[in-house]
Amino acid sequence: MLMSSSNRAAVLDLRALLASIRSIVGEEDVREEDLAAYAVDGKAPGAAAFPRTAEELAALLAAADGAGAAVIPWGSGAHMGLGNVPRAYDLALSTARLDRVLEYEPADLTVTVEAGIPLSRLQARLAEHGQFLPLDPPGSPEATVGGVLAANASGPSRHAHGTARDLLLGCRVAHPDGILSRGGGRVVKNVAGYDMPKLYVGSLSTLGVIVEATFRAAPLPVVQETLVAVFPAGTPAAEAGSAAADLGLSLQALELMDPAFTAALLDGLGLSLPEGAWGLAAWAAGSDSAVRRSMRELETLCRGATAQSRLQGGPSESLWERLRGLMQPEAAELATKASVLSSDVPRLMDSLKDLAQRSAIPIASVAHLAVGVVHSRWRLAEGSSGLEGAARVASQTEAAARDLDGSLVVEQAPPALKEHIDVWGSPRMDFELVRRIKEQFDPRGTLSPGRFVGRL
């Protein structure tokens, strides 16, 4: 059984643990002051440690596990809003100094890195050889590879390339007992045994801490171009987007945006934006002929739009950077991610817009249309009445997704709201299996206690 927070508090001797940690990493790599930056949902740790190698990190985990300490791994903090309020939090375990490129084979399109490397630095290294890692999650400029994997964070380009789970070839993981394990490999074709690395992706570092990861890279497209179209209503925008997804165009991303998101994204672009207008943004990439064909087809499909604009460039350009920025919520906001069938995205977005009007809570939503993922930001009122309304919205939003046989995750919420909801939604039928896996991998509940599904 997992150790309870009350039992943990009774046995933890933080002074003794810190002495043990210093013997592993040295005095200069332990911090006991100025820890507000490492707070999670308002809870700050008693200390932070900064190991420089995978072996040091594993040894720190073993020391913390033996002392009964609660550990939360920390990258850049870009995705720390995800997860329930931790039951306990004694030690922040930073991966900031595990930031090297360990092996890169451009000819094989594979790269192995330490978990603390910022995604932006990895992209710059790959770009030197005309390659990139097709991951563009919200907060991506500062996000670390380990944090992206732990959250399975993704952005618009999942339309063409999938999520971090799809790009991961192998990884090395530190476990609470101090053991370092390795799964997968460093080649694209690797089918032997169970694909264990995928288990850690999206687990919020509750099963182990990823210290190294091997990815499949992709060649940078020769040509990239974006089409933005503005429609008078959501239905024609969704129909044009769905038709584009079915045509086999050379699309990297296809985003459907509600009126609030459309206005925020396209402000200053020079397009005429009628009140209540919906937006469609399509990013095409590939050879010159493929992109030109895609643009022609898209412009034909968007004849019902009130305005269109073609922009040069792809994910590094200002429009897509701005789009990812708008997907990143503020700390005081409620952010939800719903997953439904792609054909049900328009219905869900209409339901959310109606819910926002009834609850008088402003909403801005954007959907990765072809993969059925809808991100929403809800601007909450201050005070207890705002939290009560937010709790109802979270419940009703989950119900709207479940009515369409979908699911919902709260990606960001004030801690006071998280105390009254499970951000992962209602437990699924496989929850008992998830609980048993957690008990096997982390029997003392050392890693991120309370933050995962069902408050594991």
Image: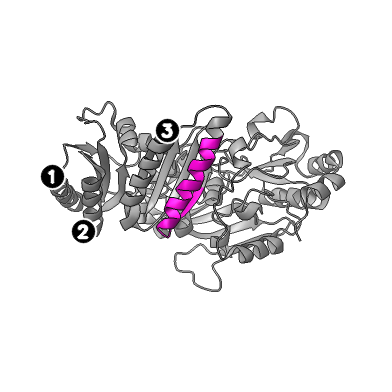
Q: Amino acid at mark 3?
A: Ala
Q: Which residues are magenta?
A: 388-409
Tell me which numbered mark, 1 or 2, is placed earlier along the sequence: 2
- The x, y position of residue 319, in whole percent, is 31, 35
Residue 118, visible in the rendered structure: no
Task: Give me the disc on residue 225.
Answer: none
Residue 199, visible in the rendered structure: yes
Mark 3 is surrounded, within 10 Å at the Cα level, by few (under 14), some (14 to 19) or many (20 or more) other residues, namely few
| Contact flag, marks 3 and 1 (Cβ < 8 Å) | no
Q: Amino acid at mark 2?
A: Leu
Q: Which residue is mark 2?
A: 247
Q: Which residue is mark 1?
A: 303
Which residue is pictured at 55% across the width and 55% down the height?
426
Which residue is pictured at 59% across the width and 48% down the height?
422
* Discs 3/2, front: 3
- Residue 312 vs 402, above or below: the answer is above
Depth order, front residue of 448/397: 397
| Contact flag, marks 3 and 2 (Cβ < 8 Å) | no
Tell me which numbered mark, 3 or 2, is placed earlier along the sequence: 2
- The x, y position of residue 303, in whole percent, is 13, 44
Overall secondary structure of the magenta stretch? helix
Whether 342 is among the magenta residues is no
- The x, y position of residue 123, in whole percent, is 43, 44
